[in-house]
Amino acid sequence: MALVERTVPSGTTWIDRVPGIWWAIALILLIMPVIVNDFILFQVFGWSLVLGMIALSLMFLAGYGGMVSLIQMSVAAMGGYMVAIFGTSGVAAISMELPWWLYIPIAIIIAAAFGTLVGALAVRTEGIYTIMITLAIASAFFYFARQNYGIFNGYSGFNLVVPPPLFGVDWRQPVPFYYLALGCAALSYFAVVYVSRSPFGLALQGVRDNPRRMAALGFNVTAHRIAAYTFASVIAAVGGILLVWQNAQISPGTAGIPAVIDILVIAVVGGVRRPVGPFIGALIYTVLRTFSSDILTTFGLSGERFKLLIGLGFLAVVFFSPDGVLGLWERWRNRKNRDSDPLTGEPK
């Protein structure tokens, strides 16, 4: 049987190889402030992009490294706390009020170091034990932040934590914050795509599939896994900084167990095999959380039971597609291709 090679026409650039649907999505995202109001822009899309970044860090560890970590929301909260401590906030007795070009890198470095330290402990376990050790550390961080008043200001946390007014722009306004979150999310997405195709990313996927063989080939399995935690922690830290700027405050509840589980749900619902999956899952989660109270109230139920809809949606997606929403889409597309004529594209 002859093999048919798929050739790329000469003169084709990477722009020509990008599907048209991606250009359409990019255009819609860029003109989103013209399409929707400030509430949808800030509370739905802005929040979705921020949560998507934090879930993206989990997707990188789980999808490319085979490590399900529940510490990512704690790493994000660490970044947010460091911004409040080293920057400015309403708690002047604790905040150091350093310049933005200093406290932002410090916050990212400390949060990444925290994630790396946790990763160094977690990579020595596998499977359910990795989940349990990261969950235990996330729980310990929550209680430590709530009970420590000298650094984390205890239960109250920090308020009035806002982004610096760079270039004379108030970045907490809906439109500027949306573009700030969109830019950071796009950079994180392309960084994950690039790293996954780099020699390090390919080696990490090899470690995921067969760590013994990779070790026999001379790769340092433990070092690759710890480096993956470091890279994922940087993304989570940036997401945590955006999260505290959006809410203008941070408290121990930001890193509580419900928030930790929410990031896992977002990643699983969207799909942990593609970097775009966490953003899809974050959008679904945010829409349900924002509007489920109105839906439940319409049917005479308490609006506080929005977790019920989120849980049912999570169960439905996992039951019908272990690969999340993207898995459902790929399954539908493959079925459509099987049912259509390969030459004309019309149904058989």
Image (cartoon, rainbow, N blue to C red):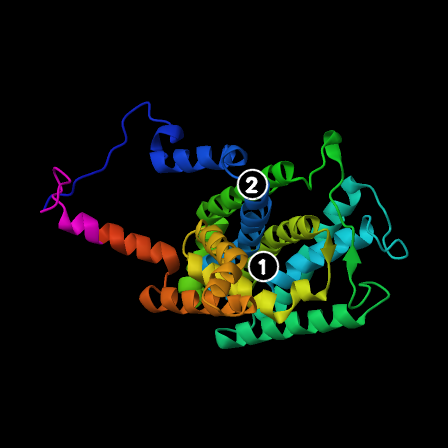
| Residue 272 visible in this rendered orientation of the protein | no
Instruction: Give the extent of the magenta segment.
Output: 335-348
Q: State which quadrant residue 136 falls in.
A: bottom right
Residue at the farthest right position: 93
Q: State which quadrant residue 225 falls in.
A: bottom right
Read off the residue under disc 2: 182
Count of numbered circles on the image? 2
Which residue is drawn at the image coordinates 24% and 33% (left, top)?
7
| Residue 135 visible in this rendered orientation of the protein | yes
**Residue 296 vs residue 110: left or right?**
left
Q: CA distance from mark 2 to mark 1?
A: 23 Å
Q: Nearer the viewer, residue 8 or 49?
A: 49
On screen, residue 205 above or below 300: above
**Rendered location of residue 305, percent (x, y):** 53, 69
**Residue 282 vs residue 246: left or right?**
left
Crowding near pointer 1: few (<14 within 10 Å), some, many (20+)?
many
Which residue is drawn at the image coordinates 78% and 46% (left, top)?
103
Q: State which quadrant residue 121 falls in.
A: bottom right
Residue type at tag 1: Tyr
Type of secondary structure dominating the magenta stretch: loop
**Rendered location of residue 74, percent (x, y):** 65, 63
The label on residue 229 is 1
> Is residue 336 highlighted in magenta?
yes
**Rendered location of residue 235, percent (x, y):** 60, 51
Which residue is drawn at the image coordinates 53% and 59% (left, top)?
289
Residue type at tag 2: Leu
Question: Element type at marker 2?
Answer: helix
